[in-house]
Structure formats: structure tokens, C-alpha cells
Amino acid sequence: MNWTILKEDEPYITPSTGKKSRRVIAKCICGNIKSVMYTYIKTGRSKSCGCVQKNVWKTIFIKHNKYNTSEYNAWKNMKQRCNNSKRKDYVNYGGRGIKVCDRWLNSFINFYKDMGSKPGPEYSIDRYPNNDGNYEPSNCRWATSTEQNRNKR
């Protein structure tokens, strides 16, 4: 569940019928606090404040100031190299059997939690210490092109 109920709010009164509906003040996983219909939370009709949206790669978070950042683009490109056989660099990644771990495959947030921010613009993701290994927390780092050139097959 993406909502945490904090307290009761004033009920919503339907103008045409005068019927009262229970509302609560709730905190979304992104930190936004909002008044929400209790039944929407209970039934799952309300998933979030709007920060969770469906995308090609299942649910990703796009209102957390990380969408289209260099970290997000590194995550997206890493997945493409391993999964999109139409990319010219696929042969060096997915074509060699290199995969993205399940924790990262459909969750940019997990990737970002594990990798953190890039130390600088000159850094990119590097599979280290095992250049033949998968993209996973124990085998990845942010590295400069000089560091990456030392880690080639």
C-alpha cells in the first residue's frame, strides 16, 4: 500500500444527495500529504497522490525529481542493452547472456537506492569486479571511462 493514514478529515458531503463520505488525511510514499476518500484507499482505487504511473516497464516513479536524470537514463539504457535485441550493442550484453537482476529490472527506485547518485557527469555504470557478470548491486559501481577501460574483457 502506498498510503499511510494519518488522521480523519472532514467528511465529504455529496451536493446532490447530502450523503457523507469518510475522508482521511494520508501520506503518500513520495511524502505528499493529501485528503483522500477512505474507501478509495481501502479498495485500492487510489494508488498514490499521482506519483505512481504505469509505463512500459511496469510501475515507475516519475514525480520524484529523478525522471530523465542521468541515473534514470543509465538504468533505462542498461535494461535496453540487455533486453532489446534490436540495439546494436545488444550482442555485447544480452547477446552474451548478461542480465539485469530482478530487483532492478522493473524498479528504478530500487536501482537508485542501491547505486545512489552518480558522483559526477563523467561517471557511468560499470559491471565490476566481474565484467562478465550481471547488472546487480554486488557487481556494479559508478566508474569513470578510465576505470572502465581497465575493466574490459
Image (tube, grey):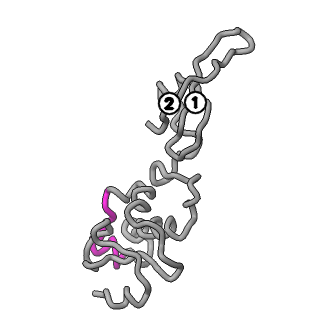
At label 1, the amino acid type is Ile
Q: List x then y, in percent, for residue 95.
A: 31, 73
- Mark positioned earlier in the residue sequence (1 or 2): 2
Start-end of magenta stretch: 91-102
Q: Is 12 placed left or right of 144 in the picture?
A: right
Closest to the observer, 103 or 54 = 103
Q: Please give the name of the residue rendered at 57% of the width and 64% of the height, measured from the top-left corner.
A: 68
Q: Is 58 placed left or right of 46 in the picture?
A: left
Residue matched to label 2: 5
Q: List x then y, in percent, for residue 83.
A: 38, 65
Q: Can residue 101 be found in the magenta stretch? A: yes
Which residue occupies the extreme right position in the image? 15
Which image quarter: residue 114?
A: bottom left
Which image quarter: residue 10?
A: top right
Q: Please give the name of the residue rendered at 61% of the width and 35% of the height, measured from the top-left corner.
A: 34
Q: List x then y, in percent, for residue 31.
A: 54, 45
Q: Please give the name of the residue rendered at 37% of the width and 77% of the height, measured from the top-left corner.
A: 126
Q: Is residue 50 above or below residue 117?
A: above
Residues at marks 1 and 2 touching, judged by CB atoms closer than 8 Å: yes
Q: What quarter of the picture does the N terminus occupy?
A: top left
Q: CA distance from mark 1 to mark 2?
A: 6 Å
SS for tag 2? strand
Q: List x then y, in percent, for residue 24.
A: 57, 26
> Which numbered marker is on residue 25?
1
Q: Can residue 6 be found in the magenta stretch? A: no
